Amino acid sequence: MHVHTSEFDPHSKDPITKAPLDPHLKALENEAIYIFREVAAEFEKPVMLYSIGKDSSVLLHLARKAFFPGRVPFPLLHIDTGWKFPEMIAFRDATAEKFDLDLIVHTNPRGKEEGIGPFTHGSAYHTDVMKTEALRQALDAGKYDAAFGGARRDEEASRAKERIYSFRTPDHKWDPRNQRPELWNIYNGMIRRGESVRAFPLSNWTEVDIWRYIQAENIELPPLYYAKRQKYVERDGMLMWAEDPRFEPLPGEVIQEGMLRFRTLGCWPLTGGIRSNATTLDEVIAELEIATVSERQGRAIDRDQAGSMEKKKREGYF
Amino acid sequence: MTAVANTALATEAPHTEAAPVTRDSRPLRLITCGSVDDGKSTLIGRLLWDTKAVKEDQAAALNRDSGSQNDLGLPDFALLLDGLQAEREQGITIDVAYRYFSTDRRSFIVADTPGHEQYTRNMATGASNADLAVLLVDARAGLLEQTRRHATIASLMGIKQFVLAVNKIDLTGYDRAGFEKISHDFRELALTLGVRQVTAIPMSALKGENVVYSGAAVMPWYDGPTLVETLELATLRSGQSTGFRLPVQRVSRPGESFRGYQGTVAGGAVKPGDSVAILPSGQVANVKQIVTFDLVRNAAVAGDAITLVLDRQVDVARGDMIVSLEAQPQTGLAFDAQLVALQPDGIVPGKRYWLKAGSRRQRVQVEPVQQLELKSGKWLSAESLPMNGIGKVHLAFDETAIFDPYEQNRGTGSFILIDPDTNNTVAGGMITAKRTEFGGLNAHEGRVILSLPTDLAEQLLATELLSARRDEVESRRVTTSAARKLLDDLEG
């Protein structure tokens, strides 16, 4: 554990030059901070799921705001499948260092031993073992009674039904038909031992809100969100990153090189890139505003079967 | 937006006021409600579709999943909403779903709430945060009991703006008289609920007439706004008209020299130098600083998440409320409230529940007094409250509770009840008034109001005679000059 020594001194701050947030983003920010504080106050052992992407980056920024001038009063948990982009891992470690965070990294030891991966075992089984099972292991090991996640309701149809406090049974199950009513901003955090709550401070944010907030607050992101020259192949309509030594082209596949960036970050074999020349935040946002496909379009796991996300969530996936 | 407020004529044209000049960039929150199969999911699907909120890959999936749903060659818009497997299997909406869309003028959060009576709790969930309610009625069926239930719950929750969406008008051959009859019936119901702002719109959600695009081609007799035009002009409800309120969520002590109280301002405004009281203890202090991540601020208003630093050591804990000295909330051991019962067991008289309001959680005993009969709109006496029942209740606390009337402040006037046996949320409630401990007297007759300078009021309440009855005394602490003026007025 770190010991926080710095003392808050309001007079040491630079003069204010930052433009105020527009009321829409301000309202979203206020709501998220309220949720963070409520969970931190009501639960014994909260943890924050940190997946290194843009939503996680916003979530972390809001957590730092919520508890300022204190430090973030709970650890961050990263479920490392072993198939993340190396740039993500570097960014994760640098961020933890920079903001004085307690970072826990967990990889499913069984999956690691059995060499489970998306190419050998398929995306669904890989996700099941290396993400869902790994998450359950880590949450059980830490005896966490609340876990923050960066999920947004606009992402996917079953997400749209999530409460801000999403109740989970001791075996991490979500029952969408039996959720607690959630009125006003009064959240019910009463649980029995073993049960837990997933808390979603970004529930009401949309993808555009996330990007506008990143811009307004100058939040640093992993460089993969910006276009640069990379090697890739086209596979099943997805632009697959081909820079990792574990990548093997299928017969007939041509490794191309070109300007590529990512709209969402995950395991590189499951997260398609997009052709783009957007190398700055402004350019990324300009590109997003005219995008005609949703951000999850590049996600292999959503398309495995109808109701795929709901099924995974019922089993404990975030 | 008050053009239709003063008259309740059945056939008056909906208002067409010019748009306000300044645009509020905060999203408008709305709910859609109504009975099963009135087409709520189809309506929202249509809203998303016509405002271009559906991306190409989602549209492709929709077309794939729809099959041949209708003879118009359109996809089944409801599938955009009913994302759960059970919903798709049964063709109904089970749980409230939140959707986001925007036009050039405004962004919207819509809560699509289920029509089935068994899921009324999810409708109440959506209504608690909404600025406006869109009530769907099937043009062929007219108002149903479920329409009345939803309108009643929405108005209880403080929604003042209603849109009556008379849907499936295409199936009545665009019958004007039928539309006007339903509008008339609904305006009468709305008046009994105290809701005076109603815009009635004939529409076909399936065909997209009067939703985003005008239906003038098929309904030349209707010259009012479309649904989206109405939503763009609607106002956000403020929900609070009280003095400063800060329910304390947590105490921040990062180091020895800093002690701040963290929470979100639930009413009024505050600035450094203001005198505040800490409830329920009644201690008094001044605000030294308002701290946020970005800056030390000169002021904070309702909605702001802040950290408050006071000028002296006082005992403050989570669940306390920091309030303006001049305009304090009510404190006491007994309150009256209205409730919506949300779970199968209903509300059991005499049972001790957990009550959570703001950041304060305490034990409470609930005595149902009356229940609303939806058919007649009458309050009938009741000893318990069944699931989905709307009732008036008495709340009895073990230790001091702190509230404002819900009408004055949604944030400090609302609460939930939690069953200690199941930990489930069993009711949502709204404070109507403080109760005195004198039986038979109403809330105002039993209390003593003191208007005195702060130090004098404190002295007086500290006396042995009054300290025990502190709850019955509402002290309006004023400055000496204000007190003198008050006395002068009385004498004059």
Image (cartoon, rainbow, N blue to C red):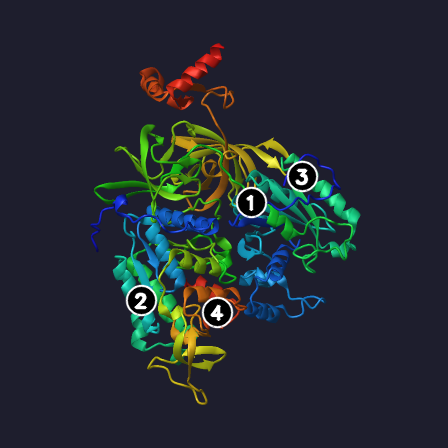
Q: Are marks 1 and 3 on the same chain?
A: yes
Which numbered marker is on residue B3? 3
Front label number (4 vs 2):
2
- Residue indicated by mark 1: B131
Task: Check contact, mark 4 vs mark 1: CB within 8 A.
Answer: no
- Report the Cα–Cα distance between label 4 and label 2: 26 Å
Q: Are marks 4 and 1 on the same chain?
A: no
- The N terminus of chain A - image quarter: bottom left
Task: Check contact, mark 4 vs mark 3: CB within 8 A.
Answer: no
- Report the Cα–Cα distance between label 4 and label 1: 33 Å
Q: Chain of mark 4?
A: A
Front label number (4 vs 3):
3
- Residue indicated by mark 2: A91
Q: Amino acid at mark 2?
A: Phe
Task: Mark 4: give few (<14), some (14-19) or many (20+) Cα within 10 Å.
Answer: some
Q: Chain of mark 1?
A: B
Q: Amino acid at mark 1?
A: Asp
- Report the Cα–Cα distance between label 4 and label 3: 48 Å
Q: Secondary structure at mark 2?
A: helix
Q: Is B343 or B87 nearer to us in this picture? A: B87
Which numbered marker is on residue B264? none
Front label number (2 vs 1):
2
Which numbered marker is on residue A302? 4
Task: Mark 3: give few (<14), some (14-19) or many (20+) Cα within 10 Å.
Answer: few
Residue B318 picture location, percent across and down:
33, 39
Q: Secondary structure at mark 3?
A: loop
Q: Residue furthest bottom?
A: A252
Q: Chain of mark 3?
A: B
